[in-house]
Image (cartoon, helix red, strand yellow):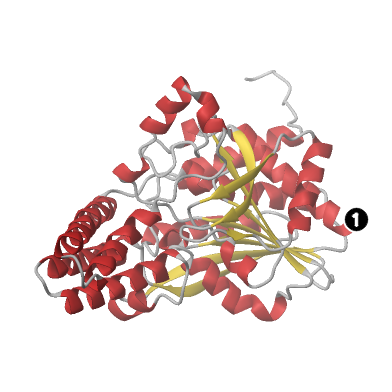
Amino acid sequence: MPGMPERVMDGRDLIAATLREVVETLAPLERSPCSPGERQAAEWLAERMRTIPGVQVALEDEPSWGSFPPTLTGLGALGTLAAALVLSGRRVAGGLLAAAALGGILDEADNGPRVVRRVVRRRRRTVNLVARLGDQRAAQTLVVLAHHDAPQTGVLFDQTFQRRLYERAPWLIERFKTPLPQWWLGLAGPLTTIAGALDSGCARRRARAARAGLVLGAIGTALLLDMWRSPTVPGANDNLSGVAALVALAELLAADPVPGLRVLLASCGAEETMQDGIRAFMRTHRHELAPESTCFVNLDTVGSPHLVMLEAEGPVRMEPYHGPWLRDLVEERAAQLGIQLWRGFRARSSTDSVIPSRAGHPTATLVSMTAWRAPANYHLPSDVPENLDYGTVAEAARLVHGVCAALVER
């Protein structure tokens, strides 16, 4: 107002303003993997990062094959057909078809070479943003990850049951730090079909197994088909919270540099394809990311009320992240900063962290949860900026800035 003195914002005010600017600018864009909106988001982020002193920014076009529901819907339908063949008495053909479907689903879910996707899907383009800060000749490197694409919704992501269970029996939810393995439903259909195909003894038992494979395959395929036909959500929590924290971290490092550390901030595209963007980033930059001197911190869905550090992830098989010492270091720095950090949790979804971890890099993954042990508004249309817990996002940015200093001190 005229006549009133201009209010000078302190550091936390500046972080909050940055977080809201990023989230509220990008949330209206339809950012499905490989879409024009995903590219528009990356281009805006590049321009925004270039306003920060000392930040060098590059956009890197990389190959991708689009979101995963079309491929997995086809594989699910293949497995359902295999069960029908076994049920009709064509055991060999049904068993072979079920084995092919099982292999394809495992390849997709477990971040394998993605043979089916590369054969049957059209090659497209995603874009990664890479920002560099600090001493580029330093012996030690920290790579901080986020992703700027957004997921599709679907009935599979409804949280009503889990929330009501927490309201009625919170002690039951609080006992578990690993969610149920949803991907196992997709594997169960082909597995039971194969069991039926291999059973040469009891015809009734063989028919029961084939029917189970048929029902499970139909349910899994229907859930994937529902996801395929569903819209892309705004993705304020998943994962504009991580992207916003990345920009805030760049501003913190510009204002308070950490000598002796090279920092790469990578906002990858096509994470919702199950890691096309980060896989391409690792291929492109592997020559400068020696595992013995490069750590990774991944900011993925950090806008729920409680900040969480994952210990492992695995849609099919659980994989602990490489370098437990880094997670201990993050916990220590969180305590020093007065930031509450939950530990001991494992994820049944895949994140970008699994790719550098498999390459031997010490890896820490920061996510967030509600009281009922689920990310707020995860893959739901309600994942909008006004439902974001900006306090948790700010804590994630401050924590990673503290970890930069801790790495040099170590």
Q: Is residue 239 visible?
A: yes
Q: Looking at the rendering, which quadrant does residue 395 occupy?
A: top right
* Name of the residue lying farthest toward the right: 409
Q: Give 15 or 156, whichever is nearer the viewer.
A: 156
Q: Looking at the rendering, which quadrant does residue 297 occupy?
A: bottom right
As displayed, is residue 230 above or below residue 17?
below
Q: What residue is drawn where x is 23% and y is 66%?
A: 196
- The residue under label 1 is which amino acid type? Glu
Residue 53 in the image, given as x and y percentages of width and height? 74, 56
Judge from the rendering whether residue 122 lies leftward or rightward of residue 28; answer left or right.
left
Residue 365 in the image, given as x and y percentages of width and height? 63, 52
Q: Give 332 or 301, whichever is nearer the viewer.
A: 332
Q: What residue is drawn where x is 15% and y is 60%?
A: 204
Residue 134 in the image, given as x and y percentages of width and height? 79, 62
As displayed, is residue 347 above or below residue 377?
below
| Badge 1 density bin: few <14, some 14–19, many ≥20, Cα 10 Å | few
Q: Give 381 or 114, whichever is nearer the viewer.
A: 114
Judge from the rendering whether residue 12 lies leftward or rightward of residue 316; answer left or right.
right
Of the 4 image quadrants, the one containing the N terminus is top right
* Name of the residue lying farthest toward the front: 201
Residue 376 in the image, given as x and y percentages of width and height? 48, 36
Of the 4 image quadrants, the one containing the C terminus is bottom right
As displayed, is residue 200 above or below residue 30?
below
Q: Secondary structure at mark 1?
A: helix
Q: What residue is drawn where x is 32% and y is 58%?
A: 188
Q: Give 89 or 131, whichever is nearer the viewer.
A: 89
Residue linked to disc 1: 409
